[in-house]
Image: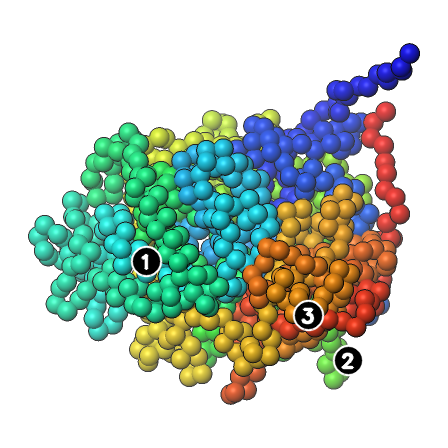
Amino acid sequence: MTYQPKIETSPKVSDEIRKTTCYMCACRCGINVHMKDGKVAYIEGNRDHPVNKGVLCAKGSAGIMQVNAPSRLRAPLKRVGPRGSGEFEEITWEEALDIATDWLEQVRCTDPSKLAFFTGRDQSQSFTSFWAQGFGTPNYAAHGGFCSVNMAAAGIYTMGGAFWEFGQPDWERTKLFMLFGVAEDHDSNPIKMGLGKLKARGARVIGVNPIRTGYNAVADDWVGITPGTDGLFILALVHCLFKAGRLDFDYLSRYTNAPVLLNPETGLFLRDANETPLVIDRRSGKPVAFDTPGVRPDLNGKHEGARTVFAAMAERYISEEYAPEAVAERCGISAERIRTIAAELARVAFDEAFELDIPWTDFRGDRHAKMTGRPVSFHAMRGISAHSNGFQTCRALHMLQILLGSVEVPGGFRFKPPYPKPIEAHPTPHCGFTPNQPLDGPHLGFVRGPEHLALKADGTPARIDKAFSWENPMSAHGLMHMVISNAHAGDPYKIDTLFLYMANMAWNSSMNTRGVMDMLTDKDEDGNYVIPRIIYSDAYSSEMVAYADLILPDTTYLERHDCISLLDRPICEADAAADAIRWPVIEPDREVRGFQTVLIQLANRLRLPGFVNEDDSAKYSDYADYIVRHERKPGIGPLSGFRGNGDQVGRGAPNADQLDRYIANGGFFVTHIPEEAAYFKPWNNAYQDWAVGMGLFDKPQPFLFQLYVEPMRKFQRAAEGHGERQPPDHLRRRLCDVMDPLPIWYPTFEDAGETAEQYPIHALTQRPMAMYHSWGTQNAWLRQIHGRNPLYVPKKIWEAQGFEEGDWARVSSPHGSITVPVALHGGLNENTVWTWNAIGKRKGAWALSDGAPEATKGFLLNHLIHELQPPRADGLRWSNSDPITGQAAWFDLRVKIEKAEAPLPECDPVLPPIASPVPDAPEHIAWKVGT
């Protein structure tokens, strides 16, 4: 008789479920945290959540290992050995706050600009910026400057928003979906869900990326483009559309500035007495304000020598310099293939157009019986953003979808509330500081011209990162990657205290990793550190911890309150507005505190405006209290749901029970947009009225998409010698070249540099789907997926070098060299090598043993990158960044590669281990939850 064991197929997983928001990447999915005996037993997706609808990736499921990671910091730390040694002593929170208050108070009382406060992948930027503004320092920003500011800024200047957090494709109706430079770490679950819908309906997917992994691997058509040439390829598509006359002329005339008249002398818009841009009305033939009720703008209108933006566009993009035959070799895409893709985009957009029987009224008062759909949509991310030509490339892509009429229409790309927003709805940057006073306005914003640059009276940069200076005029997110090197050089000035949150600047978050470590430990001739004081907050013992003087240990994401606010970035889908919270589903078992609460405690001690009452008593006790009771303006707070008596949405008085209502609702709040307001948001009266009622706007503010960005022309004019604010002479030519108000393409600075021939191979990194932050590779589950990272090599280079399985290679750039294992990859641009990012770890960090694969067979391409470009003929070294926004140009890297003589025991360079304030993890990690 065969014995058949009894197996419990549905064991009891938990005795309680607590619903909150994931933080294993920036998707902000809803999760169900299963609890047993008060401990986390299991994490799954929340099926009711508007972001992921129950779908959860490996990262989200592995959150349980993040909460139990051996690398978690245990208590506040004060450095007792040299910087970089990792030698600390544990201190109490009272001592830590006393030290931080003493340091920060000295700075605030004398010169607030001596504090540089920068945060990494923080999701509470409306709060951290409010704190920094109250402190009074001009030096604040988050990580966007080294991530994707080109995409965000280009989108906001062009159409009021961009991809990912600002919007999404109309997954239900699009028939042709085209991705540019999208790795698997961004918007992971929503894109996977969307691709599933497309595949199920038989829609076509085109992936444009030098690397074929993830989303590109499931694309119907993969375009292995040469890195840095996406903009040229896009403009070739635009050329084909113009030549064929396959444009949405009605959409362009109604909803964009294509019909706006340009002053032939200045290149600025012709305006009426109210400063409103003028168009030619087709019926009267006369110039009128673009928003005149009933006007029919003429794309080809003329007036006293002035022509339209559209006429300027046609002249530029019909030029044969953008013909497929002229760009094919540089892009690595045949001319025939470029023409085929352009024809397919036009065919689907126009020949498969459809209508929805939804009437709506536009901002000119015209009533439309239907909504016309263009079933073509796009998505793009860091792959095209992280180049020195990234801003103009992103603008070119936004222009392409606008020319097809496929933005904010059924089947196309759709914005998520509170976007889209016109530039006028955003602040301009501020930099005016006074001891013991708040800053004169928000740090970050969108300049409208040279008058909004953050400059001192002598014309030098007012910010330590040189954001909003002539070097990077439109740097909406700051330049986090330049803070340490500028502070070390004293250019534009010295600082006293560097205050960082969750930014691993001593390792994978820095260009010039070795150089940054040296800068953090460098001393002056008197034996004092060049950067005198460093305060750092993180939840884990990262590489950066060893270089700080004071450590303020953060909680894990399941141990604190967080606010995913509409004041920051939207989380939902295009049909609704949503926000969410995290809350302590478990209590910390260590002496750690949520960073945002620590900032409030410091603000109370420093008596910062906005944080204390008139009698200097604390206004907020902790971050949870702030979330509930803070009002950015009357009735508008961090959370939009359950306001007032709990029944008000968007606008309403603070509600003491608000967090409890969110928790009871699954950790989120969502409110849907009326059907009439669902599309054409920038021009739809119903949407504008709904947005005002929600508190997203104070009044309706319809706007035109800006194919021609007038502020850029103002910077060009300044470089030409016009206006009161003038750039330094050595930047005039560059400003004229790059600040073109219509999208252009120019080679990346490394491609155009003097060393391009010596270093002929492009080198890229991208994050895998199982990783996001460098947290991932110390996660006991996730590191089993990616514990090491070879350098992937295409067949052409593999065979030329005579590589075989198991070989190693020496990879060199103008900045340095590394020796690493190689592997053959069949889905690569033939002149490109790549590897996963942030897998390699430094010995001693993250509680990993010195022999861990991440510390021996894992490596960073960062060792080959520098935050500055090579010296020019005039001796100047410019930031290795986009010259418009300051976006870090990670993906400009060029290298040469040669076979190493023999495999090494570990990747080179080999840095000495650093001491860690936490012990090494045990060889085996196990624990029992429940009985």
| Residue at position x 34%, y 65% in the image | 323
State which quadrant residue 87 falls in.
Answer: bottom right
Camera sees residue 479 = no
Residue nearest the observer in this picture, 251 or 141: 251
Residue type (three-letter) at the residue carrying disc 1: Cys
Q: Earlier in the sequence, mark 1 or mark 3?
A: 1
Question: Which residue is farthest right?
Answer: 1
Tag nearer the camera, 3 or 2: 3
Other residues around mark 1 within 10 Å, as few (<14) / some (14–19) / many (≥20): many
In x, y percent, where is residue 741? 34, 66
Residue type (three-letter) at the residue carrying disc 2: Gly
**Left or right: 32 as drawn, with respect to 580:** right
Q: CA distance from mark 1 to mark 2?
A: 63 Å
| Residue at position x 52%, y 64% in the image | 227
Residue nearest the observer in this picture, 476 or 64: 64
Labelled disc at residue 801: 3
> Mark 1 near mark 2, Cβ–Cβ under 8 Å?
no
Q: Is residue 169 above or below residue 153?
A: above
Question: Which residue is farthest bottom?
Answer: 874
According to the picture, the residue beneath numbered tag 1 turns out to be 240
Q: Earlier in the sequence, mark 1 or mark 2?
A: 1
| Residue at position x 55%, y 68% in the image | 892
In x, y percent, where is residue 374? 34, 42
According to the picture, the residue beneath numbered tag 2 turns out to be 527
